Image: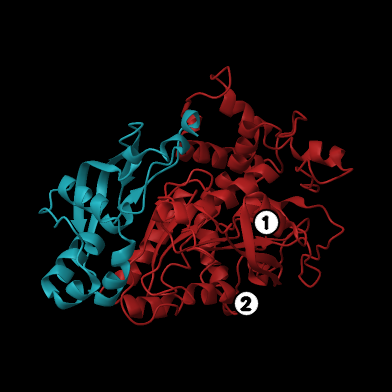
Chain colours: A cyan, B red
Amino acid sequence: MKVLTLNFLTCAVKTCKSSSDSFPLHPKDAELVSDDVELNPQLLVNLLPRIDWKALRTTSTELGFPELPEQPPTAEELEADEKMLKDLHTLLVETQMNEGKLVCGHCGHEYAVREGIANFLLPSHLV
Amino acid sequence: MSRGRGRLTTTLASPSLASLKQDLTDPLPDRAAATLGLMPAPSTTPSALPSSSAADAVAKLTAAAAAGGGAETGTEPPAAEADAEAYERTHVHGVYEAIAPHFSATRYKPWPAVASFLHAQPAGGVGFDVGCGNGKYLGVNPGVFMVGSDRSPSLIGLARSRCKQLQGPHGNAAGAGTGGEASGAAVANDVLVADGLSLPFRERAADFAICVAVIHHMSTQARRQDAIRQLLRCVKLGEVGQIGGQVLVYVWALEQGNSRRGWDETGEQDLLVPWVLKSQQKKQKTKKVTQDQGIAGGSAATKSGERPLTPPTEGATPSHTDPVFQRYYHLYRQGELEEDVMAAGGVVVSSGYERDNWWVVAANEPSHHGHQEAEI
């Protein structure tokens, strides 16, 4: 489970969808690992406008990474800033949540992450 | 099992209620098990945890297959939502858990029309592949970021290995070796386990979504339409006057006159299709099979185990010890997929038929004032 992926996930419980508390999900007892992935600057620049930056800041802080700037870089700034590219690549693409839980801030449901795979199947009373 | 057909939808006129009742006998033991200890109905139960219930279903299916057929009791159709779910647990989820590696070995070549849809997406686009199976569409277009989901933890396990291979230092080489789809930069995708009717995706976050050979496994029309509704929620709304994010859906067609299966528009739409699980699977990798792959409707699938009513003779010649798993399918008739898209509140961008499958590209109904409000 990449940090990038977390930026596109919310609680699977339908009644949580309308609540802003259900996004982003909050990592708990997270064991992080780092994959070695070749940097693809163009993909990062292209992805930038799709990323919810505020949620990414929250996730990044909760995972213990240094605080991200309040505003996202522009495409031009990111293209010109090799360090920022590398940092974002490390955070978004290389960092994996290998074990732990993802907690919904609205209903409190915890989704298990095992061997890098998050499981969003719901018990029947939450479907 | 010689029958394995019956109409489950209520809106389509069908005289075959008798065969329907016959069919629905199969899942009943499992359904009974699922509801044991939780009277009255919806509550938590060990079997409500899908991974264990899938394992239960596999055990039951294997036992039933070994016994030469399912235990047959009861006559109730899955009228209730919980029943439809239990039915699919047995006849879809449990089957895929059991056949995952075998199934995956027959599913690695991207379906060309799906690949061209993926290649048409904008650079940096974000896409979801709902029911991604072994993840064969992840990495087809290295310029986009895709998240695949599937109901089957076993298939997602296989998909994850594939993702890791594609993003590795030799991702390109790995891609070329395993299917030739990825070229260029290393590919970064991800996978997770989720139900298509309870997706964890942030709404309106995706540029596109695909759902290939999945919705035909849902056993009521309401569930099939709901699945499309969930897909439509994933993708972005368009700017005023423009189509937003697009959703590609493929389903098996009722009209398969040119396939070995020989189904046509006069046949039943709701079937149980056998999958013969060989204990020795090496034959699946023979050249004959690899030359002729496709999605669900590919003839290689037939060779490797899918064929109604008669045992397959190639790739997976069944012996009496090979378990046979019955997968539920709703075969779509012409026009039905478009109807389901519209019932789900979507619009049809384009649609067509390709090699035993109906496909549709759908989008959300263009909003006339919603965006203007947002801009004010």
- Tag of residue B319: 1
Tell me if residue A108 can be seen: yes
Query: Mark 1 falls within which chain?
Result: B
Q: Nearest the camera: B328 or B235?
A: B235
Determine which of the numbered discs, if any, sits on residue B292 in the image.
2
Q: Amino acid at mark 2?
A: Asp
Q: In this image, B347 relative to B181: left or right?
A: right
Q: Describe residue B88's horizontal placement relative to residue B134 as left or right.
A: right
B9 w.r.t. B245: above or below: above
Residue occupying the point 33% across, 69% down: B165
* Left or right of B335, for residue B39: left
Q: Is residue B109 visible?
A: no
> Which sits earlier in the primary sequence, circle 2 or circle 1?
2
Residue B219 in percent (x, y) is at 67, 44
How many numbered dots are placed on residues in this image?
2
Q: Residues within 10 Å of mark 2 (few under 14, many from 20)?
A: some
Q: Which percent across, then down, holds residue B74?
A: 75, 28
Quadrant in the rendering for residue B63: top right
Residue type at mark 1?
Ser
Q: Quadrant of residue B348?
A: bottom right
Q: Nearer the viewer, residue B203 or B136?
A: B203
Q: Residue at x 48, y 67 (%)?
A: B136
Does B88 sit left or right of B193 as displayed?
A: right
Give above or below for B167 relative to A19. Answer: below
